[in-house]
Amino acid sequence: MTVAYVGLGSNLADPRQQLLAALRALHQSEEIRLLGCSSFYQSVPMGPQDQPDFINAVAQLDTVLPAHDLLDLMQSIEQQQGRQRKAERWGARTLDLDLLLFGSQQIDTTRLRVPHYGLAEREFVLYPLSELSPDLVLPDGTTLNALLRQCDAKGLTVVFNRADIWKSVTGSV
């Protein structure tokens, strides 16, 4: 089993429900045990500003899947929820699932880069990640706390708390 962290984001088609549905799909997978989810945060778009704000979160899971198989599953969930991959970078989307960390592995292939290339400077990843694993050390030895000290929250706002998300996804408290 490998502990992995997955970033979730949406700014179209009821983003809160998009994230909840993605978490349920991960939770229902036989190859995954959902360990936790951060609160949902509202954040301004990274790319073009003429799009709605995003709702972002991070999920922690334990999986028997190899990293590329987990990526395939995540992309399947995105497609099932209406994700259409377009040439526009950082545009609006129904659902975006990013494999942020996969155990202590460093992966660099044409399809997958782990740790995720934007992890270190994205407030909408770092702050939710710190809810789940405040003492996390990245594969290169960098601490999450060190990254947080260098990253402004840029107006991140919690819009749905962890306990309510967990109850909605798993049916338990």
Image (cartoon, helix red, strand yellow):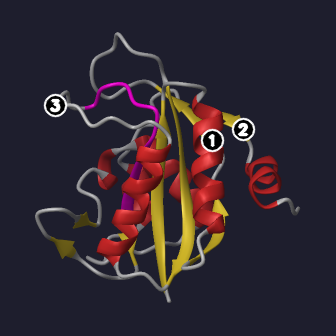
The reply to whether dot 1 and dot 2 touch (C-beta < 8 Å) is: yes
Q: Which mark is residue 87?
A: 3
Horizontal arrangement in the rendering, residue 160 relative to residue 22 (left or right): right
Which sits earlier in the primary sequence, circle 1 or circle 3? Answer: 1
Is residue 102 shown to the viewer in this render?
A: yes
Q: Residue at x 21, y 74 (%)?
A: 107
Which numbered disc covers residue 40? 1
**Tag 2 residue:** 160
Toward which corner of the image does residue 50 lie, by quadrant? top left
Q: Earlier in the sequence, mark 1 or mark 2?
A: 1
- Label 2 with label 3: CB-CB less than 8 Å: no
Query: In this rendering, does residue 157 appear at all?
Result: no
In the rendered image, which quarter is residue 130 located in?
A: bottom right
How much space separates mark 2 and mark 3, taking CA atoms?
31 Å
The residue at the point 35 percent across, 48 percent down is 150
Q: Secondary structure at mark 1?
A: strand
Q: Amino acid at mark 3?
A: Ala
